[in-house]
Image (tube, rainbow, N blue to C red):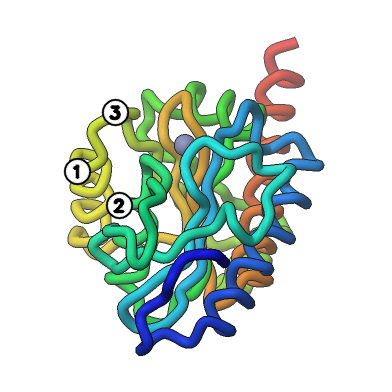
Amino acid sequence: MSQALPDAIAARHFEACADRIVETARALADKGWTPATSSNFSMRVDAGHAAITISGRDKGKLGRDDIMLIDLDGQPVGTEARPSAETALHTQVYRRWPEINAVLHTHSRTQSVASRLFARDGVVRLQGWELQKAISGYHSHDTVLEIPVFPNTQHMPELVAQVDAWLDAGKPLHAYLIDGHGIYTWGRDMAESERHLEALEFLLACELDLRTLRSS
Ligand SMILES: [Zn+2]
């Protein structure tokens, strides 16, 4: 990290977060889930700050200097770098849930196709899949796991408002799709976030396969 960090933030902790983001980003890029420099990843550094990927970098080739510090209003801290265009969706999660420490956003082909297919319903209703239990708080395949699909927009406050409206209606939220775009999910640590993302990718692929087979 070449930028000066505020004294209040331990540089070593920021660097540990940056290294963990880099490790995850490379793994997800290897799966092909971050095409053409898309996708963004973050980790909470402390109660008021997060480490997040700098906009426009190839997620398969990230290093520590491709990660920057922001406050929870999405403003850069100690750097001139520009954070991801979707930073507001990350900081919203950290502000809403103090226990959440990592947010992942990818653009896999499965996520993208599923988001288009389910957009007209506004939600993917998952039920009957054993792997739903990979989502924290779900203990049975019988429970319905709802993943909302929000309309895409380049205007982040609109997306933030859609997420707020879902939560303010009292509905559980562990992830959401954006139509034609990708998925957001999160967890109490990076490992939990990775597990959520991997499970959701698998479940969405299964739903797409079912529809293909039933229509053939
Ligand atoms: Zn995106």
Cα distance between the residues tagged 1 and 3: 9 Å
154 or 140: which is nearer to us?
154
Callout 1 amino acid: Pro
Q: Residue at x 60, y 65 (%)?
A: 193
Q: Are marks 2 and 1 in contact (CB under 8 Å)?
A: yes
- Determine which quarter of the picture holds residue 143: bottom right
Amino acid type at mark 2: Ala
Q: Is mark 2 within 8 Å of ligand 1?
A: no
Give the residue at mark 2. Answer: 88
Q: Residues within 10 Å of mark 2 (few under 14, many from 20)?
A: some
* Residue position marked by numbered label 1 in the rendering: 157
Residue 199: x %, y % from top left: 69, 54
Q: CA distance from mark 2 to mark 3?
A: 13 Å
How far across and down, in percent of the image, does residue 73 sit?
Answer: 23, 62
Count of labels in the image: 3
For residue 98, above or below residue 94: below
Q: Disc 3, ligand 1: is the CB inside 8 Å?
A: no
For the residues labelled 2 and 3, say whether their Cβ atoms are less than 8 Å apart.
Answer: no
Question: Mark 2 or mark 3: which is in front?
Answer: 2
Q: Is residue 144 visible?
A: no
Q: Position of residue 104 (x, y in %)?
A: 55, 55
Could you tell which of marks 2 and 3 lies nearer the N-terminus? 2
The crowding category of the residue bearing disc 3, from other C-alpha atoms within 10 Å (few below 14, some 14 to 19, many at least 20), is few
